[in-house]
Image: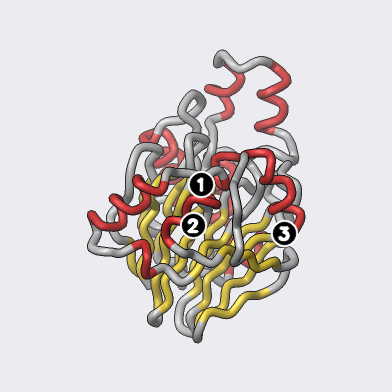
Amino acid sequence: MRIISLQSGSNGNCIYVETDGVRLLFDAGISGIQAQERLAFHGREIKGVDALLISHDHSDHVRSMGIFHRKFALPVYVTAKTYRASSQYGLGEMKAVNHFGAGESLRFGKVVVETIPTPHDGVDGVGFVVDDGQHRLGVLTDLGHVFSDLEPIIRSLDAAVLESNYDPEMLANGSYPRWLQKRIAGPGGHISNRESAELLLKTASNRMKWACLAHLSHDNNTPDLALRTHRTVLGDRMSLFVATRHGPTGVLEV
């Protein structure tokens, strides 16, 4: 299983996963040109992607859904509620839209994608687990808070792209208005570096090879701080990577 984060953060999100002959994109928050060029940099062709899966209706995850669909002929998988809510972004005409219910599993060849309902403040948000029969990858951002169903999910994974959005001190002492601070740190917002690290410490099993820290805030976090917090909590328990806000990661394997 190979994974590339093409971009991660409030400025746009898109993650590529390939395994067992199946190629998937998760979210469409970057331009079609960016997605195409960043995949090409790693020798991948976006027109060969089998499906685009959408996590929730916020613009940094859906704004190029229609472009990906029309320009690259990608079938789209999205909940009906998320699709309706996303129409405010002027997605344009879309013909191959497949609706699923949050909590359902989707099958692409021999690969199963489990959808996990999340309490994030989108209309009908989900996280994802990609299972190829040998390995399980979590694509888990925009989580809202550390909800109880996350623990068995994390325990079952071989690797995870996991939200590590903010540092609490930076958020509290930064420029965001109080209402926005409450939203980010509240039950429908995001999870912090410390919450992400403690979740991994508590629930990750020995099968977890690495975690890629994702959806880092530009104003309330830094890659170094996110890594340092996780290393303080986890020690050398697993490999750690960071998905950047400005371009692709390398090809991560599990």
> Residue, x 42% and y 66% (percent of image)?
17
Residue sitting nearer the eye, 226 or 14? 14
Instruction: Estimate how packed mark 2 is, as few (under 14), some (14 to 19) or many (20 or more) residues with alpha carbons within 10 Å.
Output: some
Residue situated furthest front in the rendering: 93
92 sits left or right of 31 in the view? right
Between residue 29 and residue 129, name the one nearer to us.
Answer: 29
Q: Residue at x 75, y 40 (%)?
A: 187
Q: From the viewer's perspective, is 217 left or right of 103?
A: left
Under mark 3, the amino acid is Pro
Count of labels in the image: 3
Question: Which one is in front in this view, the residue at disc 1 or the one at disc 3?
Answer: 1
Work out whether mark 1 precedes mark 2 in sequence or the reverse, and give the earlier one.
Answer: 1
Dividing the image into 4 quarters, which one contains the N terminus? bottom left
* Residue 97 can be seen in this image: yes
Q: In what element is the residue under mark 2?
A: helix
Q: Which mark is residue 64?
A: 1
Question: Is residue 2 shown above or below 27?
Answer: below
Q: Position of residue 140 (x, y in %)?
A: 57, 55
Q: CA distance from mark 1 to mark 2?
A: 10 Å
Disc 1 residue type? Ser
Residue 90: % across, % down: 62, 41
Q: Nearer the viewer, residue 14 or 184?
A: 14
What residue would you read off at disc 2? Answer: 70
Report which residue position mark 3 lands on.
117
Is residue 189 shown above or below 254?
Answer: above
| Residue type for callout 2 | Arg
Secondary element under disc 3, as helix, strand or loop, is strand
